[in-house]
Image (spheres, grey):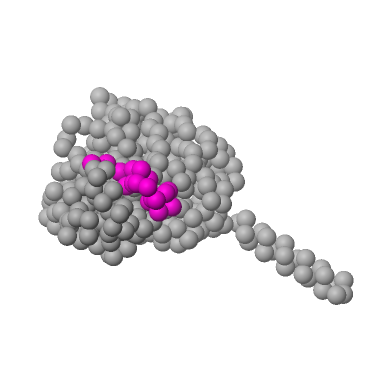
Amino acid sequence: MTDSKRLIAALSLGIAALSLVGTAQADITIGSWNLKHLGWNNGKNIGQVAEIAQGADLWALQEVMGEGAVTELEHALEAQTGESWSSMASHEVGRSSYKESYAYLWRDSTVEYTKGAVVYLDPNDLFAREPYLAEFRDKDDGDRVAMATVHIVYGDSRSDRTPEIRELASIWDWMREVYPDTPRVIAGDYNLPPDSPAWQPLRDQGAQPAITSGATTLGKTNGDYANLYDNLWFDPDVLNVTGSAIVKYPDLLGITNKQGRSTVSDHAPIYMTIGDAKPGFASAKGQPANAPKSDCIDLNTGSARELDELPNVGPARAQAIIEGRPWSSIRELTRVNGIGHASMSEIHDSHLVCPLR
């Protein structure tokens, strides 16, 4: 090879290397959800919340009314998925007697918290509820993402929301200092759609919304959605976002929007996938998350013949499952002789088992 060809080859390799570090290649699903006063005595069905929440790997949550409620949700997720989950919540924020917290919730097998959990200091006192920030890492490839979650004040009119929205550009800039060289995401309920002029300062810094059409607030009739208030803002030049969507969870749970507003939330969750991540908001069969018992197998009531249809479960293990009742988690199946962790995971991933309460 001539010297000139060696130089061209070296330059090509250098350019390729630069392109690889320019965009984060993490493979996780990130969600954001306003959970409508999670923790109040308001009839919320934590089991239904968990059925939807298991579809993403990392969640930014708004309207959390107590850290204990997040822990309860974490335990419900562990019972339903057979996996370990973790969570953390901010202290209460708010200017008036009404205060709420933010929280992060993540799947331990995929994501870990790394550093920097902090409530924004808000030097100009522009936020009624200061954003909560933290950095996380994809366990598979080590790529990191810095998150901020916020619930913008509703106020009496859109003009009340504009100052906080515009100040998100300062949050974006501050995140670059706190989490240098880490891709940034701002998640939340903004009470303004992404086409509002108030977003221009953040757009000027290279950020864009993951959700650009549709609506996330639930009406009182089935299929009725009003406003696109929830979103995830990111820089496409540094974060490889490969998909995004609104999760119309009442359809997955088989309930009406009115019922969802009462027992789950008046906001639909949103998510975006990074890299090769696959969201898990529907079963492999394309059935709703809480498929009727005729379409799933109940570990506590299913017959030996039904249990025999599960992966790695023959007649002997089906009988052992019956004798081991009651079951509160799929991961407890490792108590059955011959069902190890790998077999249990395959049973879980088959989506054939009814949700356990």
Q: Does 303 sit left or right of 159 as displayed?
A: left
Residue 13: say if magenta: no
**In this orientation, which residue lies closer to the viewer: 12 or 172?**
12
Taking the spot 17% from the left edge, 57% from the top edge, the residue there is: 292
Image location (x, y in percent) of residue 108: 44, 43
| Image: 289 above or below 35 | below
Confirm whether residue 146 shows in the render.
no
Residue 329: say if magenta: yes
Taking the spot 60% from the left edge, 46% from the top edge, the residue there is: 181
Taking the spot 38% from the left edge, 32% from the top edge, the residue there is: 89
Provide the residue span drawn in magenta: 326-344
**In this orientation, which residue lies closer to the viewer: 20 or 122?**
20
Which corner quadrant of the image does residue 297 belong to? bottom left
Quadrant of the image containing the N terminus: bottom right
**In this orientation, which residue lies closer to the viewer: 1 or 330?**
330
Confirm whether residue 21 shows in the render.
yes
Image location (x, y in percent) of residue 247: 29, 56
